[in-house]
Amino acid sequence: MPLDKVDDPRRLRQLIGALLTVGSDLSLPVVLRHIVEAAVAVVDARYGALGVLDEDGHGLAEFIHVGIGPDDARIIGHLPEGHGILGLLILEPKPLRLADLSTHPDSYGFPPNHPPMRSFLGVPITIRSRVYGNLYLTEKRGAAEFAEEDESLALVLAQAAAIAIDNARLLEKVRDLGQAHDRERIAADLHDRVIQHLFATGLALEATVRLVPAEAAERLHAAVEDLDQTIREIRSTIFALQTPKGRGRGLRGEILALVVEASASLGFEPRVHLEGPIDAAVPERIASDLLATLSEALSNVARHAVASRAEVHASVADGRLLAEVADDGKGVPGDPGTGGNGLVNMARRAEALGGSCSLGGGLGGRGTKVTWQVPLGAGD
């Protein structure tokens, strides 16, 4: 059921909050837990769970549950493996609503100390007919069973979970790529599966704006912007996968390695945004100066900024390379030419390549942003 058929603003707000986590920096288990928590709230269920299938698709590799506390979970014991109704959903991945679990012929029963559960809603987590698992909800509050609208909302959240799982598994494969045909296949999967589903989700959210109050509409717009940013980052990954490696692990890999190394002195890992054909379009000379500049900028953040967050952005567009390092620290007055040797060196590198280096405001209205840009022709 499309989102524009849902007329409850409270449910839409909760749904939007869950969808926002898909494009976040949170780990996959955290994202999936947020989705289960949102599903419980959206459909007014007492309990919820999300089962992720193993690689063979025959059993549950992960089982994330909400509503049963850790002490009660320990008493109950072993987590479900995919028997009974859960097994039925694995074999027949389609929505299932039951007023009473115990009356179904495939009911497996509950172990000792398990809370009673009657009403049930289960929906598959799928992308293009590939099943990743199922979302389970039980004990509808205020009603004897779950309604059709509950099922529709759960399906939207299951789609969000599928995108998160699919993206995480594809990116895990990217780290271990060796052969060119593998790189091309993963790039195609990212484009045809992940991007298309994110784009469709964004369109569905935009269609809902006119149906919700102003506050919810703002959150919808923010959700769409986050999805757009996620799509841009995935497109950047596709550029890298389709580009032959000429510098060992490539400039993208060098930037990521540099950021990870800087994390030790920063005390946190900066967020990285890489856009465009960075590996293919940036000449060796400019790449060396870029890495030196990023290293200097992150070193300044670690030594002087007293920051809790930082972001590194590098993009290639219209024949220019743009790099930015922003933090939320105490800020640096003046311009690059008056801020110490590090800032002076960054400015000199940019000027030698026909570019520029400047300082501005950082993250959230605090801190500093170093902006370094050069024409790509300078490296020829």
Image: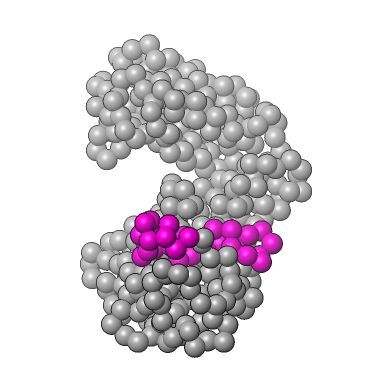
Residue pushed farthest top? Answer: 341
**What is the number of callouts on the image?**
0
- In magenta stretch: residue 50: yes
Where is residue 325? Give x, y as percent: 40, 31
Task: Using residue 22 as the reference point, say whether residue 94 is left or right of it.
Answer: right
Residue 218, located in which quarter of the rendered image? bottom left
- In magenta stretch: residue 90: no
Start-end of magenta stretch? 49-77
Quadrant the C terminus occupies: top right
Residue pushed farthest front? Answer: 112
Residue 250 in the image: above or below residue 34 = above
Quadrant the N terminus occupies: bottom left
Whether residue 43 can be seen here = no
Is residue 182 or residue 224 the one in the foreground? 182
Whether residue 259 can be seen here = yes
Q: Residue at x 44, y 63 (%)?
A: 76
Residue 261 in the image: above or below residue 162 = above
Where is residue 138? Give x, y as percent: 41, 75
Where is residue 156? Give x, y as percent: 45, 71
Q: Residue at x 68, y 41 (%)?
A: 176
Colouring: one colour
Q: Residue at x 60, y 21 (%)?
A: 285
Where is residue 210? Give x, y as percent: 30, 74
Q: Residue at x 35, y 74 (%)?
A: 45
Residue 285 in the image: above or below residue 28 = above
Is residue 106 or residue 235 the one in the foreground? 106
